[in-house]
Image (cartoon, rainbow, N blue to C red):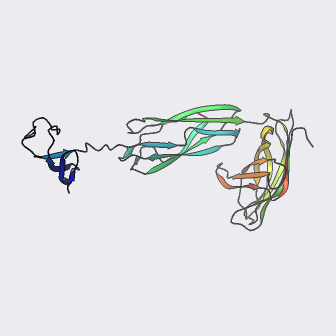
């Protein structure tokens, strides 16, 4: 290797096991920079040889915790119902991330599944936990929990939680609907019909829901409607209740339905969740209507 620049000639380069580079060459420059204590710090005669060591310095290794989502908003949840969100913790550093015990959020929030506390995540590894919001009264709720770790500049990470409980009496009116939605993986369409109403002065809503999927594994009707909430500004309604299923079908103990009225099939939206006796989701389906329509009425039929 030979390169001339500003009266310097570079003859060779080598790298040792520690990553330091050694450059050798010759110089004709009287102001060639040297370090104190060098064998020869000045130009003697026409040309001098030189050796330069380039030291990369120490390589920093440390963990880097990334938590998503931040914050965790649950939005509107019907009083007496639950909503769950998964929080992911990932190590994006280049050293092991040692996580301590996660703190407990205040009610009505809770951590129902924790695969993060007291874990060691290698670089690139991730783990999850599940947070539940279960409002027992109407109104806004806020809380948080901390994730301690050995991250040098983010310890602990505070995860803020928010949610709004909405309940019977928030708004009153009627929602009715019938139609079909596509169920992925099944031929045909799921069919439903419902008629639910709650008027001022009533202690609870009245009505019914019938739902059947094309495969026949879900075939039930409501026993009792226990909650109904409207969001007329966005043409949405949520109702829930207890369920009864025939033999051979999924045995649901309860259900929740969300509907949106957007002027008929193709636009109207129907969502349904079924729960077992332990309030665990055992079925969920949703879709825009292929046939039928959904109506939300603030003042009856």
**In the rendered view of the protein, which quadrant contains the C terminus?**
top right
Q: Position of residue 229 (x, y in %)?
A: 78, 39
Q: From the viewer's perspective, is residue 170 above or below residue 216?
A: above
Instruction: Give the quadrant of residue 33.
Output: top left
Instruction: Indicate left or right for 175 with 144 as reference.
Output: right
Asked if residue 229 can be seen in this view, the reply is no
Query: In the orientation shown, which residue stands out farthest toward the right?
Result: 301
Asked if residue 21 can be seen in this view, the reply is yes
Instruction: Indicate left or right for 156 with 190 as reference.
Output: left
Q: From the viewer's perspective, is residue 118 above or below residue 265?
A: above
**In the rendered view of the protein, which quadrant contains the N terminus?**
bottom left
Seen at 61% across and 39% down, the residue is 73
Instruction: Indicate left or right for 260 with 151 as reference.
Output: right
Instruction: Give the quadrant of residue 155.
Output: top left
Number of numbered markers: 0
Instruction: Indicate left or right for 142 with 239 as reference.
Output: left
Q: Position of residue 204 (x, y in %)?
A: 82, 38
Instruction: Give the quadrant of residue 48.
Output: top left
Q: Position of residue 23 (x, y in %)?
A: 18, 50
């Amino acid at each position: 290797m030979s390169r001339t620049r500003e009266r310097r000639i570079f003859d060779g380069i080598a790298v040792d096991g520690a990553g330091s580079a050694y450059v050798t060459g010759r110089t004709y420059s009287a102001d060639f920079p040297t370090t104190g204590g060098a064998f020869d710090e000045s130009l003697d005669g026409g040309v001098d040889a030189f050796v330069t060591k380039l030291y990369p310095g120490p390589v920093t290794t440390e963990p880097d915790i990334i938590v998503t989502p931040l914050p965790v908003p649950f939005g509107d949840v019907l009083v007496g119902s639950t909503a769950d969100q998964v929080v992911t913790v990932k190590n994006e550093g280049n050293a092991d991330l040692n996580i301590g015990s996660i703190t407990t959020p205040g009610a009505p929030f809770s951590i129902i599944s924790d695969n993060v506390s007291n874990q060691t995540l290698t670089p690139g590894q991730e783990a999850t936990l599940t947070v539940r919001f279960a409002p027992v009264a109407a109104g806004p709720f806020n809380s948080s929990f901390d994730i301690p770790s050995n991250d040098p500049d983010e310890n602990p990470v505070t995860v803020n939680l928010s949610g709004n409980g909405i309940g019977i009496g928030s708004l009153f009116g009627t929602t009715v609907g019938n139609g079909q939605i596509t169920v992925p993986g099944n031929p045909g369409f799921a069919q439903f019909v419902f008629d639910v109403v709650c008027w001022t002065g009533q202690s609870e809503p009245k009505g019914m829901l019938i739902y059947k999927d094309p495969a026949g594994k879900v075939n039930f009707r409501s026993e009792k409607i226990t909650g109904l909430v409207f969001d007329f500004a966005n043409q949405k309604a949520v109702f829930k209740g207890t369920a009864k299923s025939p033999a051979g079908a999924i045995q649901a103990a309860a259900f929740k339905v969300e509907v949106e009225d957007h002027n008929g099939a193709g636009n109207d939206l129907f969502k349904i969740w079924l729960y077992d006796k332990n309030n665990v989701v055992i079925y969920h389906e949703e879709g825009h209507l292929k046939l039928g329509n959904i109506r939300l009425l603030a003042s009856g039929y």
